[in-house]
Image (tube, grey):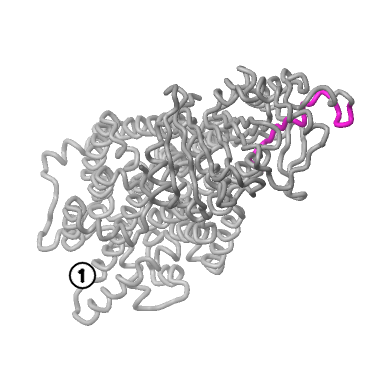
Amino acid sequence: MHQVSRSLGLIWPDLFRDRIFITGLILKLFFVLLFIPDIQQEWFVSFMVQTFEQPSIDPWSSYLDLGGSLLSFPYGPIMFLAHFPSTFIGWIIDSSTGLNYFSGLGFRVSLLMADVLILAILLQQYEHRWKGLLIHYWLSPLVIFITYWHGQIDLIPVAILVLSIALLKKKKMLQSGLFFAGAVAAKHSMLIVLPFIAVYLWFKRGIVANVYKFIVFFLFAFLIIEGPLLFSDGFQQMVVNNRESGKIFWLYIPMSDTLKIYIVPLVYSLLLYSAWKLRRMNFDLLLATLGVAFCVVILLTPATPGWFLWISPMLAIHFSKGNAGFTSLGILFNWVFVSYNLIYSSGSDILFIQDFSMPILLSDFFIQPEVKSLLYTLIIALVTLITLKMFRDGVKGSDYYLGKKPIVIGISGGFGVGKTTFSSALAKLFGNEQVLKITEDSYYNWSPSSPMWKTVTPLNPRSSSLSKMIYDLRNMVESGLFKGYVYNAKCKEFKYKTKQRPRQVILLDSAFALYSKQLVEMEDVSFFLDMDDGLLTNNQKVNLRMVDLIEKDIDFKEYIQPQKLESDVAYKLLPVNQEITKIKLANNHVKLQVRIKDGLYCQELLRVLIGVCGLQVNVNQLTNKMDGLEIDIQGDIDVEDVKFASKIMIPELNEFIDDENGFLSGKLGLMQLIALIEIDHALKRRKV
């Protein structure tokens, strides 16, 4: 059974009892206390201390006016605020004691806090990889070296970015947009992420309410934070126009004396287009795509060591999957990277130890340009392999629900059994804007007033053009030429359209959805609906003459009922007491009978229905075991129970449904839940 993601408040106690975490924490505290990175003391801490000593609403301009270096603090106001509390406390201690140690200590403590926050968020999202994440992120030589020895501070924007994306997964648009603004206002390079988040949100429209709020809140918050500083000369020089921003134009193909093709924007655009062509994107794919995007920037520019921190969470996620080959590649990369930068990059002063330096013989060997270039080439080769592996496994080889082919759902059953009600309930879950409905009404051979209906019922295949239905569905699946009912946001109802943009879900609502073998083969999952003769759906309106014909039950038994055996799940509503009739769908006197062909998930489902939802459940093994299991479900269920059950049974699919507003209560809610579980399992078997 799947585990529901816990809150961060519940993660902390387990984290502080974990031996791997404690070991890493002691190691990092050792670095924080005893190692003083050169670049921090020379640039970052110096900038902040100068601001404390001579406060200003524009510390960047003030620092430059006092003769400070342009390289001292090329970061935004959020980076300053993130370091402010602990560094300020350290500065007060230094001022009162005459020392020059505690300001830097406070600065390093803020980095350790960001480090712990990233780990906690990763563990919250991937708790089933607890040990792997502790090893590959918390004990990562890459993170430890860059942050605690070399002294780069990119963990701050990375922590805020990871928090923003985690909130995005929870569909908290306001909070996510605000935190993303904070990440960009800490380091402008985080803007690399924005187009991919926009693609992610575009695929979510209709599922998540007001997806555009993210962009609005981000822009509003960012302008509030940095707007006034954009008019500052010091901020312009140190942050907006810092030397790192020009590196994206470093690699180019000269076309003439004045015309160039810039490689980084070109490759980045191609990657963005690849993400767009996926049609679907979930949390895992978003992170994988961001990892590849960051790697592309690192590969094609003269990246500083701090930039490698951008990919550290994504690398940890992929290494924690347990692939031995990929893990070995990661270990090799970590140690080659650390060895290279230990030789060629600045490091730390060690408290109580003077003049720590590399042995002269080693220094003379590695100072040769050929040796340095060969080692750097090895790093780039390893990063290239990692990028290709992430792209292949994380993007192209992503999970079942990420294929370009839309999800095709067939819904069959007799006349007036609730097919339209059930299909509408599924459409509400997947987001009406993401659904294309194909209904049997569109394929009737005659108009409603035709005299042919006096002799042929809608349950007879002669009444419909099944060949046209098959042709249309095949075109929809293979070529993207869509004809059917699509949701019109203005009218708030489904309208028949042709040549619409591709949809993620196709609902075939027809009495003959399972009649043709060709239709069954194109459907990813199929459902059959039935109802006891004594029950009527709400607001049922049918032609009386038609009812007279249907009551003969000949066509139903000959053409419709056999389709039940073709379905993956068959629902039937029955009165608990056969003497009670004309009961509403959600009434407690109605029980739901479910036949599931593939009962692999039935044990988990039963535990949830009984333990979580408090329902009365009976299981019957059918005579022919190949026909699956039959489950009788009695009792009522509210929306919140259905939501919670879905988070347990289908946590991955929850990203593709409107789990806040899409679920219904009662028997229809149960049918939604079981349908989603079946869809989840069916899509895992699908090969795209």
Query: Does residue 440 belong to the magenta stretch?
Result: yes
Residue 462, image x, y percentages: 77, 19
Which of the pair 537/100 is nearer the observer? Answer: 537
Q: Residue at x 68, y 25 (%)?
A: 556
Label 1 CA crowd tier, 10 Å (few <14, some 14–19, many 20+): some
Q: Magenta segment range? A: 433-450
What's the residue at 28%, 46% (across, down)?
A: 130
Q: What residue is shown at x 30% (from left), y 70% (from top)?
A: 87
Position of residue 613 in the picture relative to residue 432 (left or right): left
Task: Give the residue displayed 40% in from the left and 48% down from the top.
Answer: 610
Residue at the farthest front position: 579
Q: Is residue 144 left or right of residue 241?
A: left
Q: Position of residue 598 (x, y in %)?
A: 45, 28
User: Residue 481 in the image: x percent, y percent?
Assistant: 70, 27
Residue 107 drawn above or below residue 286: below
Residue 237 appears in the rendering: no
Amino acid type indicated by mark 1: Tyr
- Res 429 quadrant in image: top right
Residue at mark 1? 101
Quadrant of the image occupied by residue 320:
top left
Task: Tell me if residue 244 can be seen.
Answer: yes
Instruction: Name the quadrant of the N terminus.
Output: top left
